[in-house]
Amino acid sequence: MPNAIVIEKTGGPEVMQFKEVKVGKPRKGEVTIRATAIGVNFIDIYQRTGLYPAPLPFTPGGEVCGVVEAVGAGVSDFKIGDRVACGTAGTGCYAEKINLKASVLVKLPKHISDEVAAAMMLKGMTVQYLIRQIYKVKKGDTILVHAAAGGVGLILCQWAKSLGATVIGTVSSKEKAKLAKANGCDYPINYSKEDFVKRVKTITKGAMLPVVYDSIGADTFPASLDCLRKFGLFVTYGNASGPVPAFPPALLAQKGSLMMTRPTLFSFVSTPEELRSVAGDLMKVIKSGAVKIEVNNRYALKDAAQAHADLAARKTTGSIVLIP
């Protein structure tokens, strides 16, 4: 039988067990995938700790690349042997073999490797909706990206730079500042040593910003709001340091009639057509060379607990993949 990571109770990395699991035949509308690379994301940690509740027991992971091994009834878009990827499975992907709905899969072109595919889907499609749909970044914009050296941050910096934006990014170390700069971040700010609001004010000569992309949460709030100009948009899409605390909506009024959104990728890829469109846009910028996916951290599937510990401690840069 194939192996998978199974969580029977929420908690620290130690609750993840590597054990044999039974994978049945694909049901109607499903395909069976043999995983070749699996993406690791902060949402997996949120589910493991119970911040984002998942029915117990469960296998974490929403991002995987693999090969189709069996096709269920009613599936016509995929055949055995197809290379496919998924970024919105929700759970279940920390496994050697998995049954997934065909509607959450996309076929992979030859120019995208298995590791890149596993690392790009959730993070890359997240960037697509952040900068092409939530706020359409354009030439001449100056934007702020928190966690600029993280998996989403590195993609966001590159893509925004290719659109003609000036990118300011926060990082936690000198090494991460160098990495962010090499990936399109014009002004990396080490927030452990500098006040990023003051730096933004200096860089923009007091004009401030139209948008802030914040995946950090508690640690960068409400300072993120202070980086925005009148009518600016605060995009909070992650909780790496814990969720943004509750606050009165009047705070947005006081700081310049600001707008705020808490989007999720699933809303932007809720149909196969939307998924193909968003994934297609991502694959296009990767093929053009404008965006390169940094897979800097590889762990065996059985070592998923260590991957979680390192990600939570911000010891990693770029993307993390598990190898079955």
Image (tube, grey):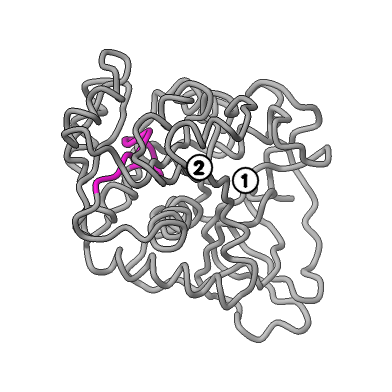
Residue at image position (37%, 45%) is: 211
On the question of residue 303 being in view, the answer is no
Separation (CA) of disc 2 from disc 1: 10 Å
Mark 1 packing: few (<14 Cα in 10 Å), some, or many (20+)?
many
| Amino acid, disc 1 | Gly
- For label 2, the SS is strand
| Residue 204 image point, x, y percent | 19, 37
| Amino acid, disc 2 | Leu
Residue 217 marker: none
Residue 322 marker: 2
Give left or right: position of 69 versus 133: right
Q: Is residue 139 above or below residue 200?
A: below
Residues in magenta?
142-153
149 in magenta: yes
Mark 2 packing: few (<14 Cα in 10 Å), some, or many (20+)?
many
| Residue 268 image point, x, y percent | 57, 63
Residue 146 is drawn in which quadrant?
top left
| Residue 72 image point, x, y percent | 75, 77
| Residue for badge 1 | 61
Q: Are marks 2 and 1 in contact (CB under 8 Å)?
A: yes
Nearer the observer: mark 2 or 1; the answer is 1
| Residue 196 image point, x, y percent | 29, 24
Q: Nearer the viewer, residue 11 or 15?
A: 11
- Mark 2 / mark 1, whichever is N-terminal: 1
On the question of residue 14 being in view, the answer is yes
Q: Is residue 267 above or below residue 157?
A: below
